[in-house]
Image: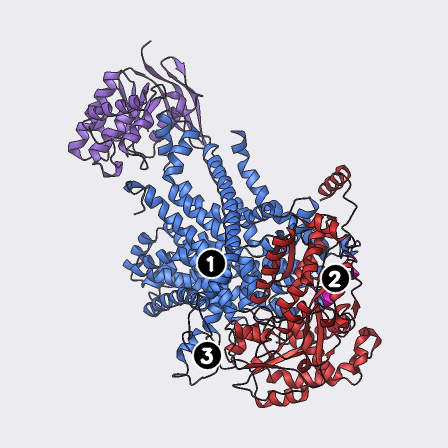
Chain colours: A red, B blue, C purple
Amino acid sequence: MTLIARLAALAALLAPPAALAEPDPADWDAVLAEARGQTVYWNAWGGATATNAFIRWAGDTVEARFGVTVEHVKLSDTGDAVSRVLAEKTAGKDTGGAIDLIWINGANFAAMKEAGLLFGPWAEELPNWRYVDVAGKPAVTSDFTVPTEGLEAPWAMAQVVFYHDTARLPDPPRTMAALLDWARAHPGRFTFPQPPDFLGSTFLKQALYGVVDDPDLLQQPVEMADYAAVTAPLWVFLDELTPQLWRSGRAYPQTGPRQIQLMADGEIDLAISFSPGEASTAIANGQLPDTVRTYVLEGGTIGNASFVAIPYNATAKAGAMVLADFLLSPEAQARAQDPDVLGYGTVLAMDKLSEADRARFAALDLGIATLSPEDLGPALPEPHPSWMTRLQDDWIARYGVAD
Amino acid sequence: MRPLRAAPALTLILMLGPVAAGLLGTLAPALGVLPALGGVRPGLTPFDTLLHWPGLPRAVGLSLGTGLAATAISLAVVVLFVAGWQGGRAMRGLERLLAPLLSVPHAAAAFGIAFLIAPSGWVARALSPWATGWDRPPDLLIVQDPWGVAMVAGLVAKEVPFLLLMTLAALPQARPVQRMGVARALGYGPVTGWLKAVFPAVYAQIRLPVYAVLAYSMSVVDVAIILGPNTPPPLAVQVVRWMADPDLSMRFTASAGAVLQLVLVVGALALWHLGERLAGATGRRWATGGARRHGDGALRALGLGAVTLAGLAVVAGLAGLAVWSVAGFWAFPDALPGGLSLRHWGAQAPALADTAGRTVWIAGAATALAMALVLACLEAEHRFGLTPGARSLWLLYAPLLVPQVAFLPGVQTLALMGGVNVGMGAVILGHLVFVLPYVFLSLAAPWRAWDRRYATVAAALGAGPGRIFWTVRLPMLAAPVLTAAAVGFAVSVGQYLPTLLIGGGRVQTLTTEAVALASGGDRRVIGVTALMQTGVVVLGFALALALPRVIARNRRGLRPE
Amino acid sequence: MSAQLHLDNLQITCNGAPLVALDATVHAGEVLSVMGPSGIGKSTLLAAVMGTLPPGFAMTGRIRLNGQDITHLPPEKRRVGILYQEELLFPHLSVAGNLAFALPRHLRGRNKRRAHVDAALEQIGLAGFGPRDPATLSGGQKARVALMRMLLAEPRALLLDEPFSRLDAALRGQIRQLVFDRARAQGLPVLLVTHDAADAQAAGGPVVELG
């Protein structure tokens, strides 16, 4: 080990000094020139067919237009990419890293930001940043309350929705209390992805919103609140709900999309999603029957944004920025919002767009199971990431390892 | 001459070097040393955190329980079957099925089985609603049950073919026909006689493969993700989760967990060894007790039934995946989908073609390297009269006995520190660690069994060692060489953790793709990927079986009896 | 110089324990028969002369062939031919391929080598058998191909390891005669190990009893 370390140090001494000039998005032409010919390894969760197809389309387009090749590294967990960057830092590999762009948000972003693993700021200098709805969608600059500070660029909006098969459940429960009553009457027909899956953890936060008195508390780090008192009603709620869950709460789907198969099989009647268009997309794909519809809870549901970030040691930073900028373009945003493609909400402000670009969005048929922005209602802000971590840990201790 | 002489040492370094180095790379963070995360002072804090994880007792229990159960059941099934059907027609039929069954990657088999036995699976669909009255899937905890029963079933279905192959390879040395002749003449039933007269000799030969099955079953990750419980998962899965935790300090806990996993495996091996001794002592008393039969007919039926069930589970599971890959909307309880469409193949296949190509490349290169090293070792053994002792067999099995989660993360860190550019090359070397032992184990016996007088005759005709190797021995042993290559190829294709960790995610194979897609649960896409994964491996075996037949179509002396 | 095989004070030990000792000279065209029950080390003696003693065996003394000390030569340089009980025809080669394998390098050119092989086949009454799979030949045919293959390599001495014991009685005499005639005709010293007295008798040379 010491020998290898010494050799590595020696090699570092002998190597020519690394190019100090990082690409600067303010000089966009220079970024475009540098990006041409680069290959961008985009690490993004690979569990959903629709997102994989969208990523392929985005890659093909930037290759044709800007000469940037995109390789989609399909992750089963975004944490894999975080670990990878960490491993590289451990080994002193501060340039030429394996990852150029990560689909990220929430706790993963907070961890990378805190550990100094991210490149930037760069996001707010992208040419297409001017279309972003910073005022109307605070989530685009505040990722789970953590300021993004230009270290990541938003590319999709998400908001918690529930979907149900109207053939079996015409009138779904619209509050957490109603959900519990319904589950008691229909045991085994509801579940949520197992925390620490982010969607499962989001269900916990959504349920907490339903029982907490002062939601503003959740915007502070968890240490600032009386955690036990604030969450006590949540555990009461879950203690009653869990035995009524699918498989009596002894097994859970491991990811959000797994629920689609469960609903198609008729195992569950109600599921949570973070993508208002997911059900419509699944219907279009033949994965769900066309009797499935989407709805939101009374009092609103949690909303957040999906981002892309560049690791500090990325190899193709310029290429990664070009790709991130393309994802922000009205063209890519409109395509992502098309339920036949992805059904993700746009991060752009309609009033900032040109007439022609506005028309792209207006022309979209959002699909039979997608709520209009008005029906979606206001998005509740994400609690501070420390809440999610604490809730996850406690949930795991109470229900995740119980039996 | 010199390079050949060094071949065994070089092979051991390439195979055991990464294991040893990786273990060190895991041990350091487990003791709190990982400078990049501020861990500089050694201490036991990671183990403290590990011990405070509330799921630990169950995770440890699961690892031990599922591992021991899967191994014991697999062994029992194989022994009962071979005892009851040695030399019979059922045995010969199964031998032919063995290669394809073995070649199905673990992940693909697990997907298939999951779909078969789930409450919404094929078995339930076939029986509903006419027999069960179900028009919706019952809320039964079958797959991912907290006791790991489904996981054990999945492991047994895949380990039975492996142990069967090992047993059949070891069988001739036990001279079963002669021994059974004597036992039957003394009035023993077929199963009882086999167990008393043949089994002890066979078990001595398959002990290491059994240990490998135990170590593998205890620390498997991909099968456990698909079929295993999650409240909590077995320890190995939890270790991989901790490694991927956004809270980077969990890496210390992960390393401590990996060390615990290693200790568990070593402990379980010791426990099994103790069991061997106890069984040996009891068995000797039983063997000399004089009892002639113990319901031999029923035991034979049980052995055949269990083996058939294991084989059928894999085959039917794959068939189910094949149907899903072309299914339109397919509601419960329909036994078949309402419509068929090639849409998913059309959408997935072009993207997967690249991945398939890369998978074949990596597997081909790792297998070629392994084959060159193994042939060099065997040839060195032959030329320099080296006699490999029992210890070298243990060394060969070391990569199969040390849990992957215990040393691969260390390998990753080390590869980066050494400045090795991650990518195909590193992944190929990583696969080599696991391909080498299998290639060696498949090839060594037929290679050593070759009649050396052919070499003497060729030498007498003026051929030097090199010419003998290339023009006599290698062509004569083409069939076993190709079979060993197909085994190595299959092992490489099936690798999940080494590809993921050493390739840094940049190097994707059909297996990493399949497991990543599995998290989405879309059975159609899983079907397409799992079938391609299986197809690549089956193609390798088909080539290995067909090539010698084509080459030797006019050479009766090369064909097996 | 006349062809002679000298075994000077040959002593073979197995892990230190003495196994076989022999001091003999075999003259050109003469057959020295070594007899003894199985397990006495007859085949080991031949392996020592071939230079293929397995690990664990050691040898003292010298082996000289036509005055040249071949004790430390590798097997392929000794030019000592051997025939075993089994014919050991290479199963992956045709009959012609087996014979061509033995042809010395100095015969160059495809046509020339082929002509040699054809001529050799004709000599043993197997003209036209070149393309055949050796596994399809009868026992007698195989034995003749094996003999011819050995002779084509231009050996300077011949070792026979019970080469006739697997043949049936009628064939045995015939093949035995063929081998001895050939050896005598080419003036080769022959070392025969056998446990069949009839073999030794037919050989007509000196007989050494081991054990």
For disc 2, the marked residue is A152
Q: Closer to us: mark 2 or mark 3?
A: 2
Which is more toward the observer, B363 or C11? B363
Q: Is residue C152 magenta?
A: no
What's the chain of the residue with tag 1?
B
What's the chain of the residue with tag 2?
A
Residues marked 2 and 1, same chain: no
In the image, residue B482 sits, relative to residue B259, either above or below, namely above
10 Å neighbourhood of mark 2: few (<14), some, or many (≥20)?
Answer: many
10 Å neighbourhood of mark 3: few (<14), some, or many (≥20)?
Answer: many
Tell me which numbered mark, 1 or 3, is placed earlier along the sequence: 3
In the image, residue A401 sits, relative to residue A173, either above or below, namely above
Residues marked 2 and 3, same chain: no
| Residue bounds of the magenta highlight | A104-123
**Does the residue at mark 1 contact the one at mark 3 (Cβ under 8 Å)?**
no
In the image, residue A247 sits, relative to residue A53, either above or below, namely below
**Residue C34 position within the rendered picture, expressed as x and y whole percent measured from the top left:** 29, 25
At numbered mark 1, what does the secondary structure look like: helix, strand or loop? helix
For disc 1, the marked residue is B532
Residue type beneath disc 1: Met
At numbered mark 3, what does the secondary structure look like: helix, strand or loop? loop
Alpha-carbon distance for marks 2 and 1?
36 Å
For disc 3, the marked residue is B332
**Total numbered circles:** 3
Alpha-carbon distance for marks 1 and 3?
26 Å
**Residue A245 position within the rendered picture, expressed as x and y whole percent measured from the top left:** 59, 82
